Amino acid sequence: MKLSQDAEKLYQQLQQQFQTQHSNPIIGQLLHKLKLCLAESSLLMPSLTDTRTTDRDSLRKARDILEIGAFYSIRTQNIPAFERYISQLGPYYNDYSSLLTPSERRYALVGLDLLRLLSQNKIAQFHTTLEGLVKEHDHQNIDILHNNQFISHPINMERWLMEGSYSKVWAARAQMPIEEYRYFLDLLVDTIRNEIASCQEKAYNLLPLSDAGTLLFFKTPGEVIQFAQQRKWHVDPITQTISFPASNNVTKHELAKEKVIEATLGYAKELETIV
């Protein structure tokens, strides 16, 4: 298993393009050609039976290509492609780990994959991935889950989501380890907004526009109004209030939602004053 001379040239071009133009379409074209080269060289999904004939430098470069492909997929918002790249990187991170030096990009990509699983509500797979990391370190260095910024970030996100601490999720957007995390964090925030909006509809008949904006993590009234229109809420520009459809009026067994939403609103306002 060794890269051809043509593949080596394409690899050098890919490295140059990725360093200067992170979402340049040329990168996608180079990746397509290089994946064909990897397949021809049995490096796309390498087998452990071929270790004696495997060129380590080619293995490292193949891993680089797949890692760049994974990052490029996030930057172009092609999540199915990202999932394929993560799957193809598995043998390089596991089966061939003894032949390769550790990848500096690995944990960033694992963290991105954890955020993907969260954004898709695949909580069981999220924890399976974490358990795999623990087993990999023989259960002796579990600190990796908390001390590695790429891994601890999605772990905290999952805990805050389970707690309903949505304001903390929002604040975490300002503490991303790398910019690529933003795509999945924005998906999570959109999900949170719609969940909070559903609670608003059931807990209130009327809500001040400013409170709705704070609760939904919007910075301007215009953003709130646009969101309200999408939800078919009525916005009164004179009283600066939002009224919700009559069909969603509160019922007795839903009164708890109002208490929850008021607590969340209070926390959001407190966070706003701190920031």
Image (cartoon, rainbow, N blue to C red):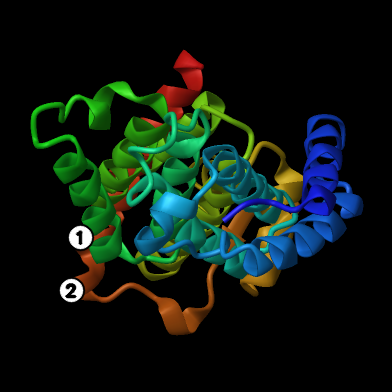
Q: Residues within 10 Å of mark 1 (few under 14, many from 20)?
A: few
Q: Image quadrant for the N terminus?
A: bottom right
- Percent x, y for residue 128? 22, 58
**Residue at label 2?**
253
Q: Residue furthest bottom?
A: 247
- Percent x, y for residue 126? 30, 56
Q: Are marks 2 and 1 in contact (CB under 8 Å)?
A: yes
Q: Residues within 10 Å of mark 2 (few under 14, many from 20)?
A: few
Q: Nearer the viewer, residue 216 or 68?
A: 68
- Percent x, y for residue 193? 50, 56
Alpha carbon of mark 2 to alpha carbon of mark 1: how far? 7 Å
Where disc 1 sits, the SS reads helix
Query: Compared with residue 149, is residue 39 higher up or lower down, i.e. above or below?
Result: below
**Quadrant hosting residue 236:** bottom right
**Quadrant hosting residue 21:** top right
Q: Please indicate, yes or no, whether residue 234 appears anywhere in the rendered image.
A: no
- Name the amino acid, label 1: Ala
The residue at the point 86 percent across, 30 percent down is: 20
Q: Nearer the viewer, residue 90 or 131?
A: 90
Identify the mark at residue 256; answer none if there is no mark. Answer: 1
Q: Please indicate, yes or no, whether residue 216 appears anywhere in the rendered image.
A: yes
Query: Compared with residue 38, is residue 156 higher up or lower down, i.e. above or below?
Result: above
- Percent x, y for residue 98? 33, 38
Question: Number of callouts in the render?
Answer: 2
Query: Compared with residue 79, is residue 263 higher up or lower down, i.e. above or below?
Result: above
